[in-house]
Amino acid sequence: MAKKNSKKANIDKALNSGKIKKDEKEISQNPEEEEQQEQAQNVVGGKKRKRDSDNEEHAPPQSPQKKANTSNFVDMSSEESKFGEEVELNYSFDSLDVSEQTKKAIVDMGFTRMTEVQARTIPPLMAGRDVLGAAKTGSGKTLAFLIPAVEILFKLKFKPRNGTGIIVISPTRELALQILGVAKELLKYHQHTFGIVMGGANRQAEVQKLLKGVNLLIATPGRLLDHLQNTKGFVYKNLKALVIDEADRILEIGFEDEMKQIIKIIPNENRQSMLFSATQTTKVSDLARISLRPGPIYINVDQEKETSTVEGLTQGYVVCDSDKRFLLLFTFLRRNLSKKIIVFFSSCKSVKYHAELLNYIDTPVLELYGKQKQQKRTNTFFEFHNAEKGILLCTDVAARGLDIPAVDWIVQYDPPDDPRDYIHRVGRTARAGGRGKSLLFLLPSELGFLRYLKQAKVPLNEFEFAKGKIANIQTQLEALISKNYYLYQSARDGFRSYLTAYASYSLKSIFNLNNLDLQKVGKSFGFSVPPKVDINMGVSTKEQKSGRRAYKKNEDSNKKDYYLKQNSKSGSRQWSR
């Protein structure tokens, strides 16, 4: 304990020496002062399948929906359907032809005016049309599909014995839980049942609930397919609508095969479908073609906008050498302890290490990443969601769709290698018309990434930080890591995972492992001399489907060579001192 207090005292001494003060003005630009500061310079400007276990009591209610238009699929690159153009937009929720129960719930939720995606999407969905919607994160699309979904259940008088009438598919557990929360509020005055099935949760408890009848079911793809294939008594033959939220993300993380199987299993006749995606890709188009009926409406509320990110978002980047990265991050966080901040990292073990370190040196943070147990992830999400201030360290598991209120800052400590990932990350702040700020860390060798952001219509300013005001705690940090066994092991794992993640970036011309100064990278993890680690450059076919972050580690880290080597057969590289 004395050693720990000694390390903390050294760090506190650095804090109090004038290098960093908690009460100082923020080191980044305020939106109000942005135009007056000359430091910031613009640089970017299906087959049908029926179940044999049907019972008379599960007979479906008669649907009032009309058959869909059988015209050709609307090309995703074309203009919005005439249906959307001819209807004059009314942004008032009072204008919607919905049940009194739904109207009352909307009032209780505090909403009076619809967002653009809601105003454009809800009317055609209420008319029974299939919709492919493209909108930025934070645009309010959750209510855009839940309101029509609830009204379908209401009009058809769905009861538990009718089984599942609506399925909402979400890419991640956290987003699924969030949708469940909104659905609970929206169904407050309705009698319809709702529930969730997702990986990591108690499967038997889910089975019991499905057997009782879940009218509105929110699910992650893998667990939903599991129940469709294996849960006897799961009544889904009366399915009236399928919602696929964050379709691009579902496909990016490797659920393409599962989605195809799900669509083959669920009823296809008279099923309305709603597909939402923040970005449009060939795979999203293919999924739309097999899941939507002929003649769907394509609604893109962002097509004519000059930027790909929401208004009210102040975005900047800072150029920083590897050995100064953690010092700058630490300084920034200590100066903004009264704010709500999300910090993105490229790997789970890097998140774990930095969370352990920051908590140890009295900078309280929460951590959220994919390999956590589900209960831990759920508790962390809701703790940060409900907090007025705090710091959340996370991987991209939190980057898509999550609606966390009043986030002041998005910090991308490890940059993404795709502008789309950048857009999804910053979409956690300035949501629903609010304001927020983002900060992107870049190495000098990574400045070429700005060209890709410019092409993606992402406006960025350069933020400058006075070197004299950055906390110089490197000596104390290295002493702490060298003497604390558990922190050393965690730092070593984080260091290895950072290099492995970096090696898996697709933009090799910008994010090149050979361009990294390992001595400086090691210092950012608290090492005076970088440890010997092995990384495996080979990625299996299945992992490639799961995207950049599904890298594969080489567990053998006990080789005796002390130089960088590359094995041409295995693709394994060894980094050492």
Image (tube, grey):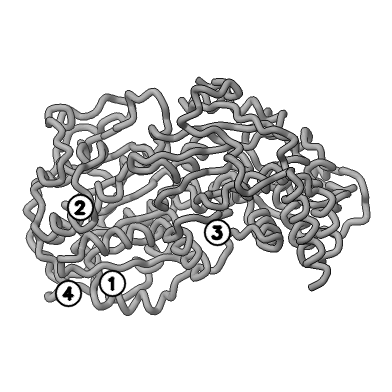
Q: Is residue 62 left or right of residue 280?
A: left
Q: Residues within 10 Å of mark 1 (few under 14, many from 20)?
A: many
Name the kind of residue labelled 1 in the image: Phe
Callout in the foreground (4, 2): 2
Residue 205 in which image quadrant: bottom left
Q: Residues within 10 Å of mark 3 (few under 14, many from 20)?
A: many
Query: Could you tell me residue 468's position as x and y percent?
Result: 75, 36
Looking at the image, is mark 1 or mark 2 earlier in the sequence?
Answer: 2
Residue that badge 1 annotates:
234
Return the residue nearer the eye: 273 or 513.
513
Query: Could you tell me residue 576's position as x and y percent?
Result: 87, 48
Looking at the image, is mark 4 or mark 2 earlier in the sequence?
Answer: 2
Residue that badge 4 annotates:
161
Which residue is painted at 12% across and 28% down in the image?
86
Which residue is painted at 78% across and 45% down in the image?
472
Image quadrant occupied by the N terminus: bottom right
Residue that badge 3 annotates:
368
Tag of residue 147 = 2
Query: Could you tell me residue 362's position as x and y percent?
Result: 67, 61
Looking at the image, is mark 3 or mark 1 earlier in the sequence?
Answer: 1
Return the residue nearer the eye: 157 or 431.
431
Q: Is residue 273 left or right of residue 37?
A: left
Callout in the foreground (3, 4): 3
Q: Are marks 3 and 4 in contact (CB under 8 Å)?
A: no
Looking at the image, is mark 4 or mark 1 earlier in the sequence?
Answer: 4
What whole-number distance in Å separates the C-alpha atoms at marks 3 and 2?
30 Å
Q: Secondary structure at mark 4?
A: helix
